[in-house]
Amino acid sequence: MTKICYSSEVYGLDVEELLALHDSSHIPEKMPDDDVILLIGRRKLWVDDYPVTPDTLLKGRAKLAKAQELGLRYIPVRIAFESRIKSYDLISPLIRKLRYKHNLFSSNVYHMRPQEIREKGLERNLRTADNAYKFSNPKYQMSEEERHQTYEKLVTSMQQKGYDDRFPLDIMLCRNMGVKDTLNQGHHRMSVALECGINRVTVEFCAVGTPPKILQPFCRMLAHMNLSVKHFISRLRS
């Protein structure tokens, strides 16, 4: 039986976009108590041969219809996903190269408030004009002038055109130690959006799997420590 995993966070997603989804034919025996649950499918990636499946609504159509009736734009949503790894695989959720090997991406993109991403502490690095495009990998290193020009170009673009929906922020579910959602790609776009006062961005969700339940409390402790260290280093670089 396919293992269904759930995001560590709930996300305020666009009501209309969720109502446009079909109901899921896969209903797990046990689900979280959240009113609305989105089951992400998988879009086609050139690196794998997994079948393409659409995102579906696992739970909450009546709640969404009520929210629409009340004129609400966003509603809290828990994200569910099918694990791409075996239940005894303790390594793949933790190692970056293995995560990318097994990673699946939602078939759809969704709109939400970037302020919520910041409030939930999902960013692994807090990007600013001072530390923009400073990468540890020598392959991606830029000069001071290139870094500032690239950052200012992004700021100017968002000020003039708003957020470009062609480049969604990538949120990986249960990325950190296999238990904590984090922003995977898009830290610069995220910071610039907030700097420019933009209150609506596009996101996509990706996932691999989670470690066995017996290890998850320990993994949550490690995830908290890991993010705290990353945020501390990020502030030093600023």
Image (cartoon, rainbow, N blue to C red):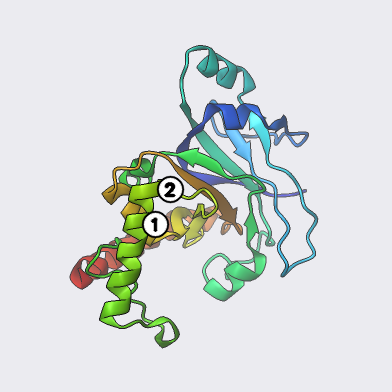
Horizontal and vertical percent position of residue 164? 48, 50
Work out whether mark 1 precedes mark 2 in sequence or the reverse, and give the earlier one. 2
The quarter holding residue 138 reads bottom left
As drawn, which residue projects farthest toward the bottom? Answer: 138
Q: Do the residues under discs 1 and 2 have CB atoms within 8 angstroms? A: yes
Q: Amino acid at mark 1?
A: Arg
Q: Which residue is mark 1?
A: 189
- Residue 142 vs residue 92: left or right? left
Relative depth, front residue between 135 and 218: 135
Q: Secondary structure at mark 1?
A: helix
Relative depth, front residue between 210 and 199: 199
Q: Amino acid at mark 2?
A: Tyr
Q: Answer above or below: position of 182 versus 4.
A: below
The quarter holding residue 109 reads top right
| Distance of label 1 from label 2 (alpha carbons) | 8 Å
Within-10-Å neighbours for mark 2: few <14, some 14–19, many 20+: many
Q: Is residue 49 visible?
A: yes
Q: Which residue is mark 2?
A: 163
Is the C terminus in the top left, top right, bottom left or bottom right quadrant?
bottom left
Horizontal and vertical percent position of residue 182? 44, 55
Horizontal and vertical percent position of residue 76? 47, 31
Relative depth, front residue between 40 and 153: 153
Horizontal and vertical percent position of residue 7? 52, 46
At x 36% / y 39%, what residue is drawn? 199
Image mark for residue 143: none
At x 67% / y 48%, what residue is drawn? 107
- Residue 49 vs residue 222: left or right? right
Q: Nearer the viewer, mark 1 or mark 2?
A: 2
